[in-house]
Structure formats: structure tokens, C-alpha cells
Image (tube, helix red, strand yellow):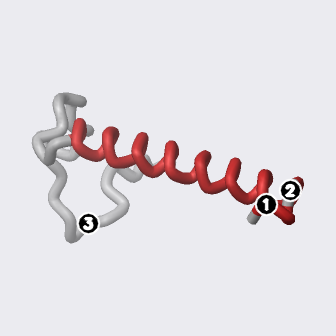
Amino acid sequence: MEVVRNVCRGVHGAHRGDLRATGPDPAGGGKTVIANLIGLILAVLVAVYMVAALLFPERF
């Protein structure tokens, strides 16, 4: 049985085809996490507002 090491033959892998070691994200991953948290908080607030509008339509 033949073992296939590199399925994409035209693409060269780093370190002789091995996987890269994990490390800190140089693209600024912390900013992405903060943006996701802000989006989550806004989504929860909108959901609470919509439920309140459905339960008490005379106030909106």
C-alpha cells in the first residue's frame, strides 16, 4: 500500500511538509476577541429588547 504524504503536490509545505507549531497570532488576535465580545453583547441586548417588545407591545 502506497502512503500519500502530500495531496496538493503543487503547494510546498513549511518544514518539509510538516505542520507548523502553534504560536501567538501575529495578526493581532486580541483585537478580534474584543470585537467578538462586543458583538456578542450587542446581540444579547437586541435579543432581550425583542423579547421585551413581544411581551409588552404597548410600551414600544
Which is more foreground, mark 1 or mark 2?
1
Residue 33: image x %, image y %? 33, 40
Residue at numbered disc 3: 9
**Amino acid type of disc 1?**
Arg
Compare residues 3 and 58 and report the one nearer the observer. 58
Label 3 Cα neighbours within 10 Å, binned few <14 / some 14-19 / many ≥20:
few
Which of pointers 3 and 1 lies earlier in the amino acid sequence?
A: 3
Q: Are marks 2 and 3 in contact (CB under 8 Å)?
A: no
Label 1 Cα neighbours within 10 Å, binned few <14 / some 14-19 / many ≥20:
few
Q: Are marks 1 and 2 in contact (CB under 8 Å)?
A: yes
Residue at image point 18% right, 29% down? 23
- Marks 1/2: CA–CA distance: 6 Å
Label 2 Cα neighbours within 10 Å, binned few <14 / some 14-19 / many ≥20:
few
**Amino acid type of disc 3?**
Arg
Residue 14: image x %, image y %? 13, 46
Residue at image point 57% right, 52% down? 43
- Marks 2/3: CA–CA distance: 62 Å
Q: Quadrant of the C terminus?
A: bottom right
Helix, strand or loop at label 2? It is loop
* Left-right relation of 8 to 42: left
Residue 59 is marked as 1
Compare residues 48 and 56 and report the one nearer the observer. 56
